Amino acid sequence: MTRPDVLEHALTRPGRSITELKEFLRFPSVSSQPGHARDVRRCARWLAEHLRRIGLPDVRVIPTRRHPIVYASWCGAPGRPSVLIYGHYDVQPPEPLAEWRTAPFEPVVRGGSIYARGASDDKGQLFTHIKAIEAYLHTAGRLPVNVRLLFEGEEEIGSPNLLGFVKRNQDLLSCDTAVISDTAMPAEDRPALIFGLRGGLSLEMEVTGPAHDLHSGSFGGAIHNPLQVLCEILAGLHDPDGRVAIPGFYDSVRPVSATARERTAEAAPMDEEVLLNARAPRGWGEPGYTLHERVTIRPALTINGLCGGHCGPGGKGIIPARAIAKLSFRLVPDQDPHHVERLLRQTLSRRTPPTVGVSLRRLSAAFPVVLDRRHPVFRAAARAYEAGFGASPAFLRSGGTIPVVHAFQTILGIPTALVGFGLPDDRIHSPNEHFRLRHLFQGIATSIELLSQLGEFDETRTMRWKRNQADEQVQFRAGSP
């Protein structure tokens, strides 16, 4: 069978692919909510069974301390490279439910897109590779490369158990390169290969005061209000110009050259595009940078949630006993999330009044990464994009975080091609998340071509690159944007 035959098989059965994707999306696999733990396990079992049905011989559901990993492999191409395809089947919470036009876990097709939680992040994008593999196995009976699939159920909570799994299973996961589709293109028909990701640090800060809620008439003005203290602390974490006001926070930020900024600006979205995708009237943030630069080459601190006191209808005259804030740092090379946490703790110790207590709990931490754009996998991915989308990709950084990329880079010693099919207005992490069906099938075509392109590398050439990669990476970092 030729590659056109494989492509024809994949693209002439759109109804079945959409029906199967809907089945996948119906599972409320919300990894952060304990009440959905059973749903996450059910989703993992469905995914494993689907991989068996398409013809993969080795499929496993591997338990972890929280949510399972789904692993599968096909190793019938001796002398050819091995490709590790990663994705995640867990999703963000769907709340606020009232803002969804249709139920978040009852997928519907509307206006050329499929709407459901996880449609773009990451079930729809993950599914493109599954359908590409299925097309090869059902037509040619084999793949042009060896593949290993690693689908986790904890990415949305920072992949707490995946790092240990990768460390313990380096032989099982041994590959020449990794491929991930969990990023966005700048716009329709404008594909992008992502070569940089911000790191992340997610924290929960709690301020405690009296042993229980107090009557504000009896104690207002006499007992320090934990919610007030929390707001004052949070307000002090940014300067008026938008810079993070934590001493030492910017000390290790890797500078980006003017040349690199100019090169990136040629392909990056303009401020107007960013605002349009955000449905926001104005931008905000650190002076001296475009909006795209603020979310890619500069770090940020975001308050994701605030809880304290009475939030129901009507008034309630109380001083709350406690207040909580959810914080999220996005970090750039060479920031260490653990060092940033120490800096925050030092800042809180200086700024917390003696009338209350403050505690900090880490929810997740991930390192930023910069990938070597000169690696052959990037050239293969660029040609695959050209075949799938009819356009050459731009090379851009992303403001998001994918924790496993750093693990692949440092533990397995392999590069990762970040080949995303989402769009900035897919509303990931928000109500009415959706994924364009056109991009679903263009993604399948891109994946088919990528596997073919990688299959043209023989193992000797690939391994020769890996042996030279350490020196190449040192040179790249010295002059990297």
Image: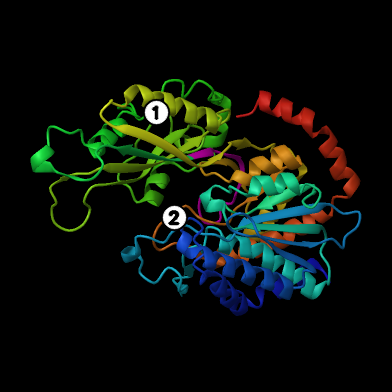
Q: Which residue bears the numbered disc 1?
A: 244
Residue 429 is marked as 2
Using the rendered image of the protein, determine whether residue 104 is visible from the camera's viewpoint: yes
| Amino acid type, mark 2 | His
Residue 439 in the image: x percent, y percent?
Answer: 57, 63
> Is residue 29 highlighted in magenta?
no
Report whether 40 appears left or right of 128: left
Residue 242 in the image: x percent, y percent?
Answer: 35, 30
Q: Quadrant of the N terminus?
A: bottom right
- Secondary structure beneath label 1: loop
Q: Determine which quarter of the picture holds residue 306.
A: top left
Residues shaded magenta: 186-201
The image shows residue 52, relative to residue 445, as above or below, that is: below
| Viewer-nearest residue: 46 or 204 | 204
Residue 115 in the image: x percent, y percent?
Answer: 46, 68
| Viewer-nearest residue: 18 or 378 | 18
